[in-house]
Image: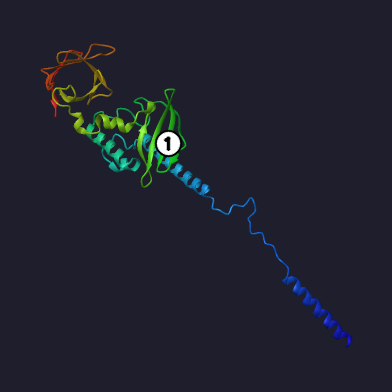
Amino acid sequence: MNKNSFLFILVSLALSACSMSAANTNVVVNTNPPATENTEPDTGNIMSAAGESQNARAEALIADLYKQHDAKKSPFFQTKNRALVDKYFTKSTADLIWKDATSSQGEVGALDGDPLYAAQDMEIKNFAIGKADVKGDNATVPVTFTNYGQKVTVTFKLKLVAGWKIDDIIWPEGTSMVKVIKDNYANADKQAAPAGVFGGKFQVGDTNCTVRPSKLAYEVHWAKGSGVEMFFFKDGYTFESSPDKGGPNRFEFDDESYSTGVFYRADGKEFPVKRVK
């Protein structure tokens, strides 16, 4: 055997030995993820991202409502644009707001103050819209401000109905706007009290007023005027105001039906009174 043949045999044997060694070698692969790696989808972050989006949308609705309200484009106290009410409120609440606006016929309705500021007179400062608290299809958004130096919180209750809509407004001390309208003047028929009750609408001279029993007194809302004048039962069929200054105004009815009578103004003038049906 020559030298070259011998070297070829040696090289072939060496390569064959390497191949057999590699075939018999066990390669260990770590199929377990590192301790810091999470192979499950991070549903918490997904939910958080969705929740934050809904929070922002709920807060944006309230911000837009106040913006339009302050710009004299409010859904309240108007009877020309029902769609404007529906833009912000659930159908049931929008129905109440619209009914109250259309039933009051230019007079003071169930909402006798600004529903967004829970007041009749305002000097608003430190206005802020708080963070929305979203729980499923419901949310609350607090709005805080000071009015004449007094801290006030108005809370909006929202429902997810093709987007967020306001279902109620909760004023200080827990008063519900929806309950106020429902209990008092949501239905126009409730403004016309039956005979035998000092309440409802009355024609007084060339103006008119709406009378609403309120505990031991009677609220009189004049068509030509603002605010509320309180009257109290005096005797017989007579009801008299109790002003801080000057003499009282007085209703004197002909009988227990409270359908006709005379209104005696504090300045001495007299006006015929009759119930308006």
User: Which percent across, then down, holds residue 4?
Assistant: 86, 85
Quarter of the view holding residue 89: top left
Q: Is residue 173 left or right of residue 20?
A: left
- Compare residues 46 and 86 and report the one nearer the observer: 46
Residue placed under numbered mark 1 in the picture: 141
Quarter of the view holding residue 253: top left
Whether residue 217 is visible, yes or no, is yes
User: Which percent across, then down, holds residue 175?
Assistant: 35, 28
* In the image, farthest residue toward the bottom: 1
Q: Residue at x 23, y 35 (%)?
A: 102
Q: Residue at x 72, y 72 (%)?
A: 23
Split into 4 quadrants, where in the image is the C terminus? Answer: top left
Quarter of the view holding residue 134: top left
User: Which percent across, then down, holds residue 224?
Assistant: 23, 25
Q: Secondary structure at mark 1?
A: strand
How packed mark 1 is, by other alpha carbons closer than 10 Å (few <14, some 14-19, many 20 or more), is many
> In the image, what residue type sits under mark 1?
Val
- Compare residues 11 and 190 and report the one nearer the observer: 11
User: Which color scheme does this rendered protein use?
Assistant: rainbow
Split into 4 quadrants, where in the image is the N terminus? Answer: bottom right
User: Which percent across, then down, holds residue 180?
Assistant: 30, 30
Whether residue 109 is visible, yes or no, is no
Total marks in image: 1
- Compare residues 16 and 266 and report the one nearer the observer: 16
